[in-house]
């Protein structure tokens, strides 16, 4: 009897494919392919879901990415029914509000932007941010107090993330990434639209050492990423993501699926080593529909497109249409390739532009 793995993520197709390569029988929960992510808030649905799996498997593992932040009522059943591979849900709850981490981040040499519960001081530009947020959804410049939201001081400049893996307490820094946003996407101006590897950050050693110290104080395990800005030479943490994120594919491919294997099967005294050339720079973008689209696959035999809808599926305005992945030997060449693939795709589908 093979082991089972339940994968929870807004987009689960890549993790599903790679877990199958490792010999697992996979049961995905996601927002766009299986369309069952929002169903799991109903106990009856999860009961039936796990009854089906437990009749076939003695061991059920769980790997999760984005999408569970606002579904706390599912945490107990998911914990009871599975072996969680990665951080426990108490860590996820703790990190949902960055203000909870201020003391530990300060001890690690990191800062957070100022935050306000109800009102914004005069002449201070802030964003309104949900406590249980993921993917940049519902973050805006709204200045009206809302239940379940708080105000965070807005810091200008590019946003970066740091990807790292902790295997049995051993910290491995994977890389820095620059994050992309959509242009003129007014409903969700901070929605995550992709990322690319980057290695020329100022004070990179200091940042890595601070993140390693922070991760030991929480403590974190498995794959994690932290979003941050460098502002007035200080490092401001915007979000701590104690889970698999969109940049996981970049590094899991570089390490030939080793990261997912270690997420599922931690090994003591195991050194993580890349199997692909690390001098290649990888990046990806999410394309979001600018209008309702009845999907027709007009781009055949491509190796750089993922997460396409099924034929004749309705993709609603503002929803993700597909993902474009590229790699190159230089940052300039990667940007050129991404823009070229974006242009090829948007010749067929009307999508929002991306600020790269």
Image (cartoon, rainbow, N blue to C red):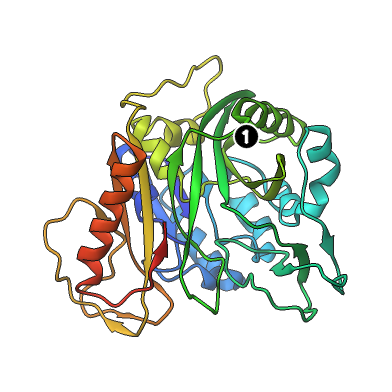
Pick the quarter of the image with the C terminus.
bottom left
Picture quadrant of residue 111: top right
Residue 1 visible at all: no
For the view shown, which residue lies furthest in the top direction? 269
Residue 15 location in percent, x, y? 39, 48
Vertical arrangement, residue 239 with respect to residue 206, above or below: below
Viewer-closest of 40 and 350: 350
Residue 345 location in percent, x, y? 23, 66
Under circle 1, the secondary element is loop
Vertical arrangement, residue 205 with respect to residue 334, above or below: above
Q: Find disc 1 in the rendering and name its residue.
A: 221
252 to the left or right of 222? left
Residue visible at 87% across and 72% down in the picture:
122
323 to the left or right of 143? left
Q: How many marks?
A: 1
Residue 169 location in percent, x, y? 64, 24
Viewer-closest of 320 and 183: 183
320 to the left or right of 328? right
How busy is the neighbourhood of tag 1: few (under 14 within 10 Å), some, or many (20 plus)? many
Residue 202 location in percent, x, y? 60, 33
Residue visible at 67% across and 74% down in the picture:
141
231 to the left or right of 291? right
Residue visible at 67% across and 36% down in the picture:
220
Residue visible at 62% across and 25% down in the picture:
205
Viewer-closest of 322 and 227: 227
Residue 81 visible at all: yes
Pick the quarter of the image with the N terminus.
top left
Picture quadrant of residue 233: top right
């Amino acid at each position: 009897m093979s082991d089972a793995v339940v994968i929870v993520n807004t987009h689960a197709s890549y993790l599903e494919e790679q877990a199958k390569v490792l010999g697992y029988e996979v049961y995905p929960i996601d927002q766009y392919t299986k369309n069952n992510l929002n169903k799991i808030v109903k106990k009856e649905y999860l009961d039936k879901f796990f009854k089906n799996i437990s009749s076939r498997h003695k061991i059920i593992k769980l790997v999760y990415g984005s999408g569970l932040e606002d579904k706390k009522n599912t945490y107990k059943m998911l914990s009871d029914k599975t072996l969680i591979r990665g951080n426990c849900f108490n860590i996820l709850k703790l990190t949902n509000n960055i203000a909870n981490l201020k003391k530990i981040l300060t001890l690690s040499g990191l800062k957070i932007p100022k935050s306000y519960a109800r009102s914004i001081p005069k002449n201070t530009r802030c964003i309104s941010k949900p406590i249980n947020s993921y993917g940049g959804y519902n973050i805006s410049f709204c200045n009206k107090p809302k239940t379940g939201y708080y105000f965070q001081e807005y810091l200008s400049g590019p946003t970066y993330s740091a990807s790292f893996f902790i295997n049995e307490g051993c910290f491995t820094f994977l890389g820095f990434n620059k994050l992309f946003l959509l242009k003129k996407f007014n409903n969700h101006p901070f929605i995550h639209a992709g990322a690319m590897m980057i290695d020329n950050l100022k004070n990179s050693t200091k940042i890595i050492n601070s993140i390693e110290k922070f991760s030991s104080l929480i403590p974190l395990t498995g794959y994690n990423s932290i979003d941050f800005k460098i502002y007035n030479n200080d490092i401001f943490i915007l979000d701590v993501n104690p889970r698999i994120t969109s940049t996981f594919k970049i590094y899991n491919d570089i390490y030939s699926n080793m990261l997912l294997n270690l997420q599922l099967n931690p090994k003591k005294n195991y050194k993580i080593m890349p199997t692909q050339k690390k001098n290649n720079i990888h990046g990806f973008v999410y394309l979001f529909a600018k209008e309702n689209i009845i999907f027709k696959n007009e781009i055949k035999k491509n190796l750089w497109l993922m997460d396409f809808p099924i034929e004749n599926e309705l993709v609603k305005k503002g929803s993700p249409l597909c993902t474009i992945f590229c790699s190159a030997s230089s940052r300039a060449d990667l940007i050129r390739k991404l823009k070229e693939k974006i242009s090829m795709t948007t010749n067929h589908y009307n999508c929002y532009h991306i600020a790269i």
